[in-house]
Amino acid sequence: RPLVLLHWTMITLFIISFFVILLTTWLLQYYKYEKYLKNIKGPRPWPLFGNTLQMGTTTDVLPTLLDNQKKYGDLFKIYLGFATPFLLISNPQFLEFLLGSTKILEKSSNYKFLHRWLGTGLLTSESKYSTLLQLAD
């Protein structure tokens, strides 16, 4: 009987430890980005899930984002789980400034997996084609 109790105690401690480590990891990542994004408004994220649960089903994502745009303006942030926060921009002048800048235009690490299939091109380059993009204007 004591071995069974010890077994369940160990399992319980393992599960609690796992969630404490998971929560701590999420909070550290959240505050790492929040020190830079604190002045940008957005819906309050839930620990571990971010704003994922607020999105609902796949058919609810766009209406939810449009509601957030009405609440928070042309620039707002959302957190989706453990991923890097997303900045959503709906102001055309701000987008033109960002896309026209060769210093700001750097691809995120999410584009690296596309290199195998697409090679280096307009979508996956690191500003190699910025002069071509400016010439196209």
Image (spheres, grey):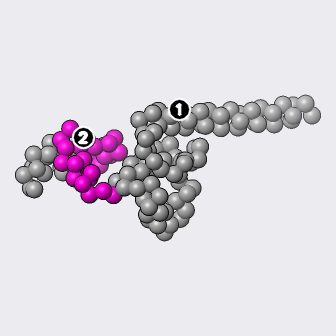
Q: Does the magenta stretch include residue 104?
A: yes
Question: Is the N terminus in the top left, top right, bottom left or bottom right quadrant?
Answer: top right
Q: Residues within 10 Å of mark 2 (few under 14, many from 20)?
A: few
Quadrant housing residue 62: bottom left
| Residue 90 locus on image (x, y percent) | 33, 58
Query: Which residue sits furthest left?
Result: 135
Q: Residues within 10 Å of mark 1 (few under 14, many from 20)?
A: few
Magenta stretch in the rendered image? 90-115
Q: For the point 10% across and 46% down, which residue is it?
A: 131
According to the picture, the residue beneath numbered tag 1 turns out to be 28
In the picture provided, is 134 more to the left or to the right than 110?
A: left
| Residue 93 locus on image (x, y percent) | 24, 54
In the picture provided, is 90 more to the left or to the right than 71?
A: left
Mark 2: amino acid: Ile
Q: What element carries label 1?
A: helix
Q: For the point 86% across and 35% down, which residue is it?
A: 4
> How many angstroms separate mark 1 from mark 2 (CA)?
26 Å
Query: Which residue sits furthest bottom?
Result: 59
Q: Do the residues labelled 1 and 2 touch (CB within 8 Å)?
A: no
Q: Which of 51 and 11 is in front in this view?
A: 51
Q: What element carries label 2?
A: loop
Residue 104 marker: 2
Number of labelled discs?
2
Q: For the point 15% across and 42% down, which residue is it?
A: 128
In the picture provided, is 18 more to the left or to the right than 126?
A: right
Residue 57 marker: none
Question: Is the C terminus in the top left, top right, bottom left or bottom right quadrant?
Answer: bottom left
Q: Nearer the viewer, residue 121 or 68?
A: 68
| Residue 24 locus on image (x, y percent) | 59, 33
Mark 1: amino acid: Leu
| Residue 53 locus on image (x, y percent) | 57, 56
